[in-house]
Amino acid sequence: MVALAVKLRQCEKNTPPDFTTNPPTLRNSVFCQKQPRNQQLVGLNQAQDPANDPDLFFDPVTKATVRKGAQANTSPLGGGGGGVAAPVASSTVAAAPAATTTPVAVVDDNTASCAPPVTVTVTSTPAAATIADTTGTCAPPTTVTVTVDADGTDPKEVSTTAAPPAATSQAAATPAAPSSALDFGSCTNPAVEFGPAFEGRKLSENSFQPQNKNEFPQASALNGQIVLNAICNILNDRCKAPAATVAACKAAVTAVANVVGGAKADQFNAALGIASDFANVPAAPGGGPGSAALASTANFNKCDVPTIEFGIFDGRTENSFAPSGNGFVHGSALNGNIITQFICDRVKSDCNANTVAINDCTAAIAATQGKTGQAFADAFNTAVAQNV
């Protein structure tokens, strides 16, 4: 329960954008100003979305925007940290700082009111260590000695040993770092990609997302500017990239503001010294490297390639039209346009087909105009499968 509470305390809080500005301004959530009852939560604050304006906060009481410093809750309680999680440490740990002694206020959880603070002196002497990523072993545990003097007469000394974290069997896959003359700080790949079906979106829905979600944990968006701004903010706040790199990133965001589609991603990446070709070859469905085939091949996804048949169906005595293929259940009709329109509606909705398949189905309807009978069916069937 304690571990869950610690994680929950550090989660982001949703705040509504300021829709009085154009474009809407993303705002931070205000910080709690009450000391937590549980000692394990002292000093913990919620994370803030890196895409938010760092100087603006949403006050749920006044329902208004508050500038940082205008009121106490725009800063963490006691001046503690707040924002995105710190980046993962590099493979070599810097030399350890000198031992420190820090007084910490302790809150009595057993009473409704706050008890007089008890001073706890924590003396930590961390050992400098160099951790090689290739060894697969953890650093030696660190021993921390805590000296507690509750009433000034009975000091007690408690020694604890922090257990090293459990080793994982396999590191998360990270995209290869691109070649660039810019210094990205502790990060390696700030490129953006453009393609279909990111994060569960439909195959026909293209959006933008960072190529390396480990370093740049920003969700996909139809509006590419949201993702690009987030990348620049993370470069500055989390990757600690040099000012020149951050300036180049922000200049690129402005330069591509009116560019759309894959070209927007390509031009932004080029400004950071990274080559891409999303204008011609979108990313594969869900992300990652695409191919020329993925960019031009029809994918009906959950359904078969649809066809229509012309003949005697459903107990009729005259010829009619009926759909064929998994995912297309419909009664026969004398008017073939009823069947073709039904098929293309299903392709867009339940089949979750890609854009090429949807466009081919629309073209197949056009190909049947002026035709009747078997010629009508043949024209549709040929056109709908032209890019399979």
Image: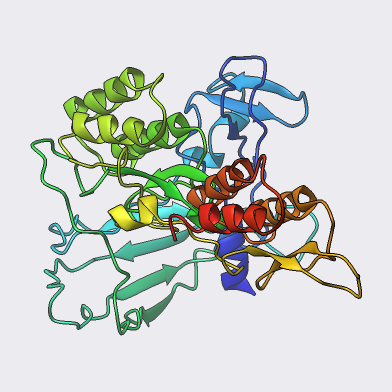
- Between 1 and 39, the residue placed more toward the observer is 1
- Between 122 and 59, the residue placed more toward the observer is 59
Q: Is residue 239 above or below residue 315?
A: above
Seen at 23% across and 48% down, the residue is 189
Say whether residue 118 is visible: no
Q: Residue 203, percent across and down?
A: 53, 54
Say whether residue 235 is visible: yes
Q: Residue 278, percent across and down?
A: 31, 42
Quadrant hosting residue 141: bottom left
Seen at 29% across and 38% down, the residue is 235
Residue sitting at the far left: 181
Q: Residue 24, percent across and down?
A: 59, 22
Q: Is residue 19 above or below residue 345?
A: above
Q: Report the quarter where the C terminus lies.
A: bottom left
Drawn side of residue 184 relative to residue 252, left or right: left
Q: Residue 201, percent across and down?
A: 56, 53
Seen at 20% across and 32% down, the residue is 270
Seen at 17% across and 59% down, the residue is 96
Q: Is residue 108 above or below residue 61?
A: below
Tally of numbered tags:
0
Quadrant hosting residue 3: bottom right
Q: Report the quarter where the N terminus lies.
A: bottom right
Residue sitting at the far top: 21
Q: Is residue 218 above or below residue 52?
A: below
Drawn side of residue 254 relative to residue 81, left or right: left
Drawn side of residue 112 relative to residue 133, left or right: right
- Between 58 and 112, the residue placed more toward the observer is 58
- Between 174 and 267, the residue placed more toward the observer is 267
